[in-house]
Amino acid sequence: MKQPDLPEPAENKDRVRLTAHSGKTGYRSRFLGLAAVGVLAAAAVVTTFLPGPNEIQANAADKGPAEELKIGYFANFTHAPALISQSKGILKDQLDSDGTKIESQIFNAGPAAVEALNSGAIDAAYLGPNPALNSYLSSHGESLNVISGVAYGGASLVVNDKITNPEQLAGTNLASPQFGGTQDVALRNYVKGLKLSQDATVTPSSNGTVAQLFGRGEIDGAWVPEPYASLLVEKNGGHRLMNEADLWPEGKFPTTVLVVSKDFMASHPETVQKLVDANTEAIDWLNTADDKEKLKAVQEALAKANGSTFDEAVIAAALKEVNFSSDPLPETYQELVDHALAVGVGTGGDADGLVDTRFLDKQER
């Protein structure tokens, strides 16, 4: 298969020093039911089931199905449910009965997608959890909600063969995809926790550029998502020094989530429900297709969205590292906020309320 076209190095090469001292996988079994609320009616006390406050707000502003759904995603492996949903027409089939049109846009970075969401240029997006958190906290909870999980796992620190233990990261040059992004925060937090005897340097760089830098020996390693981690291993002689899954309970940490603007969610909850349903359907397809069919479909979807794809061995290896799941893993977000605050990214805050499970809950009924 054709190797991906790798972009030129990013203009921003600010180096940040870290001081040494300073699946269909179970969501449906975890979030069930609505709370029973007692109300007075007439002269008797009756008990009924009422929607939660978020649902009341949405119903109050409900304008029916949207004429158009504008959605953003990345041409990335960890966004495979979005790619499959588009390439197989899953989302289109969900929305056709309402006459809702789809306008899709491909982004290269989370902050750009969040900016588009906040400006109304798009209504929903597939994002890494950190950009979603940053938007939610900086807007005091008014900008967006995570409405479903997409993928968890699938991020690793890959290093050259000279580094065999974490202590050898002292004095090294490491890369992350983007300053303040999900993998960037994970790398900085991990290295800070090592309390190395000598500074390590982190150079934010695009995923595509990392392979070039690693191949030329300009960096000693990188904390990157799939399939770039597998690309460094399979084609550039690297090895996984740390799989991020080893740092989380049951190996579960969000890699990609589905978010929607609060305004769109309040105005068009029926359309949002169909978006969530399509995402779940795409995830189900990925988790039930045989390996050859899944590999071919992901490669074709990447090629269509990106103009290029990855070697078969790279995609096959990456598929073993990533779990596609609608579980939004709500218990992880406060820890992600704390990690970012610990390394000086963002201002911290309360992640409670970021995840809105009402649309996933309805799939249980």
Image (cartoon, helix red, strand yellow):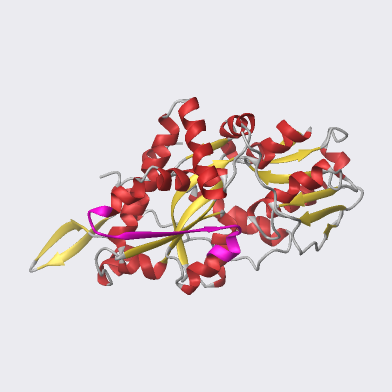
Residue pushed farthest left?
Answer: 43
Residue 280 seen from this side: yes
Q: Which residues are magenta?
A: 96-113
Please state if 256 lies on the left or on the right of 16 as rendered. left
Q: x, y percentage for residue 154? A: 61, 40
The quadrant in which the N terminus is found is top right
Q: x, y percentage for residue 175? A: 77, 50
Please state if 88 lies on the left or on the right of 365 as rendered. right
The residue at 29%/50% (across/down) is: 94
Q: x, y percentage for residue 164? A: 84, 32
Q: Quadrant of residue 236?
A: top right
Q: Quadrant of residue 250?
A: top right
Q: Is residue 114 magenta?
A: no
Out of 207 and 17, give the one closest to the viewer.
207
Out of 144 and 205, give the one closest to the viewer.
205
The residue at 88%/34% (across/down) is: 162
The residue at 65%/43% (across/down) is: 4
Residue 24 seen from this side: no
Q: x, y percentage for residue 235? A: 73, 33
Task: Tell how many labels.
Answer: 0
The residue at 74%/55% (across/down) is: 8
The quadrant in which the C terminus is found is top left
Q: Is residue 102 magenta?
A: yes
Q: Is residue 228 above or below residue 356?
A: above
